[in-house]
Image (tube, helix red, strand yellow):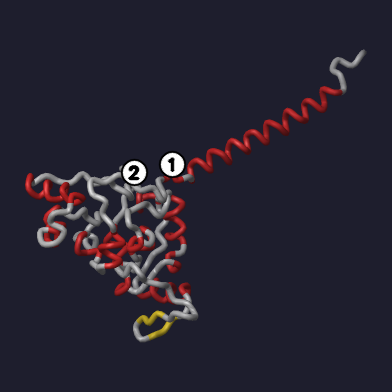
Amino acid sequence: MGQIFHRSTNMVSRISIYGAVLIIAALAYALYAIAMSPWYTNVGVKLQQPVPFSHRHHAGELGIDCRYCHTSVENSSFAGVPPTQTCMTCHSQIWTNSSMLEPVRASYRNDTSLEWQRVNALPDFVYFDHSIHIAKGVGCTTCHGQIAEMPLTQRAGTLYMSWCLDCHRQPEKNLRPKAEVFDPFYQPPSRLHAVTVDGMEFTDQLTMGRYLRKEYKVASLQYCSTCHR
């Protein structure tokens, strides 16, 4: 019986199979790159806000404590968006004629809220509690990045589940003394910069983190129901 297919068909078959595998791999990589890109995650993207509020000026240069504006951050799941009255505590006395702050003054005059765009917005099916993280020694900059250096607020992390789990698996990598939680310029311990906790000096993060994890009773919570309720 004669050969049905020409011998070159074998080469065509191999090229087709290998090519399909390469195309699938390239497509998977492209989808991953898109999923991790600022276009999709909003990392590093500055959203349009009613007022160009600068954390660098307020928290960094003026040294205003985070809790002055985010009043519920220590006892609530939500950090709290400051009401206009909080802004006017200062701006009824300073920069009173600034055109940039007219939306704030209008909000105060008309008793209407400013419509801020949430920078670190989580999906509705995700539960996050600010208060418990603060109580366990997780600093603001751990999740929000170098906020005191941002002239306009932007997202520092993807907020993906894998991003959260990286910390939940090894919380000691990110723990700091509770007294330093709100310090936007906090630096973790190193050989050149010791951090003192309970009278003891630490020169590396993991050693201090393990100590704080035990002292603060930090559990490595990885159950689905921890965040998905």
Residue type (three-letter) at the residue carrying disc 1 = Tyr
Q: Quadrant of residue 171?
A: bottom left
All told, the count of numbered labels is 2
218 over 201 or under it: above or below = above
Image position, residue 186 (x, y; %): 37, 71
Image position, residue 165 (x, y; %): 44, 55
Element assignment for label 2? loop
Image position, residue 187 (x, y; %): 40, 72
Element assignment for label 1? helix
Q: Quadrant of residue 7?
A: top right
Residue at 36% across, 81% down: 197
Residue at 43% across, 49% down: 160
Left or right, 214 with respect to 191, comes to: left
Of 88 and 132, the residue lying toward us? 88
In the picture of the structure, the residue carrying the numbered disc 1 is: 40
In the picture of the structure, the residue carrying the numbered disc 2 is: 123
Task: Give the mark, 1 or 2, whose residue is nearer the N terminus.
Answer: 1
Residue at 18% across, 55% down: 82
Of 104 and 187, the residue lying toward us? 104
Q: Marks 1 and 2: which is nearer the front? A: 1
164 over 14 or under it: above or below = below
